[in-house]
């Protein structure tokens, strides 16, 4: 639970057919950096949530535990500003910067941006030091991991808390080998920085079954994405290659835990 709180909300990335989610803490880092690029602005907190909890869609794959369903999002930001420009002008520039970062750098479906001025700054003091973290944001998503690592596929981190089925004997060994194959495929995707494991093993394989369907394997992948790539595009490619890595073509969910 402590690790999930560190990630913040698990936000739907893209649409209901994309099958990918993004940690709010990771989104907050990117949005704060975009806010710091607006002259005369010091961001004091950025949060992201569903714009309307009633306006959501059913995802095509099982979501990560506690993830928000796909739907339009709202960004809420507190900021301090200088009086060098009229506040409405500054707010309009900040709103545009946050909207562009959400769409172009991340791929979030943001339809609303709510802003609140928390303080006025002296013009000669500037917006303050830059940085990835800030009030209202939680940073840090675990260390670097990879195939066979302490938190990598086949490691001892998995406790079954995400609802995955546990295998015994040969089945467990087979799943561990398949997890390694998925991990190698994911790490070969341009824009993937590393595998990550704040919610357990970076690659988890379990069986899922609908009411009228035969059991089918499902893969959940956790990874960090490089900031010089659009997060949604990388996550889509991760999902595609993870599914192609195994002969039974399992369903795949991707959780991006950091943008670095």
Image (cartoon, rainbow, N blue to C red):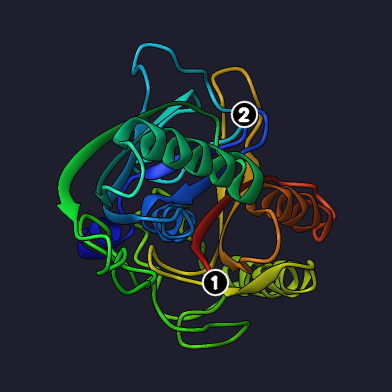
Q: In terms of secondary structure, where does tag 1 sit? A: loop
Residue holding disc 1: 260
Among all residues in the image, which is located at the extreme bottom?
149
Question: How far apart in space, not on screen, are marks 1 and 2 (Cα)?
Answer: 23 Å
Q: Is residue 63 visible?
A: no
Give how far across and how far down residue 182 sits, in percent: 72, 66
What label does residue 248 carry, if any? none
Residue lying at 80% horizontally and 57% vertically, measured from the top left: 241
Residue pictured at 48% horizontal, 42% vertical: 98
Question: How busy is the neighbourhood of tag 2: few (under 14 within 10 Å), some, or many (20 plus)?
Answer: many
Residue 143 figure quarter: bottom left
Which is more toward the observer, 244 or 195?
195
Disc 1 or 2, which lies upstream in sequence?
2
- The answer to whether any part of residue 66 appears in the image is yes
Nearer the observer, 59 or 190:
190
Residue 15's disc number = 2
Image quarter (top left, top right, bottom left or bottom right) of the C terminus = bottom right
Mark 1 or 2: the one toward you: 1
For the point 39% across and 54% down, which residue is it? 28
On the image, the x and y values in percent for residue 134 come to 26, 64
């Amino acid at each position: 639970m402590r690790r999930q709180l560190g990630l913040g909300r698990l936000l739907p990335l893209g649409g209901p057919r994309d099958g990918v989610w993004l940690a709010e803490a990771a989104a907050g880092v990117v949005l704060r950096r975009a806010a710091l690029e607006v002259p005369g602005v010091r961001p004091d907190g950025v949060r992201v949530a569903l714009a309307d909890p009633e306006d959501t869609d059913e995802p095509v794959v099982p979501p990560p535990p506690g993830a928000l369903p796909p739907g339009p999002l709202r960004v809420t930001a507190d900021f301090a500003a200088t009086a060098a420009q009229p506040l409405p002008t500054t707010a309009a520039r900040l709103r545009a910067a946050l909207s562009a970062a959400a769409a172009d750098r991340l791929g979030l479906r943001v339809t609303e941006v709510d802003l609140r001025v928390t303080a006025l700054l002296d013009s000669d003091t500037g917006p303050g030091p830059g940085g990835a973290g800030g009030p209202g944001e939680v940073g840090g998503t675990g260390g670097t991991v990879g195939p066979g690592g302490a938190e990598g596929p086949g490691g001892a981190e998995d406790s079954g808390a995400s609802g995955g089925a546990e295998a015994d004997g040969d089945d467990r060994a087979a799943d561990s080998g398949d997890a390694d194959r998925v991990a190698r495929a994911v790490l070969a995707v341009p824009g993937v920085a590393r595998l990550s494991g704040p919610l357990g093993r970076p690659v988890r394989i379990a069986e899922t079954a609908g009411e009228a369907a035969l059991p089918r394997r499902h893969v959940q992948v956790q990874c960090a994405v490089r900031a010089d790539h659009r997060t949604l595009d990388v996550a889509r490619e991760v999902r595609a290659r993870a599914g192609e890595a195994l002969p039974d073509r399992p369903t795949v969910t991707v959780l991006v835990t950091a943008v670095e």
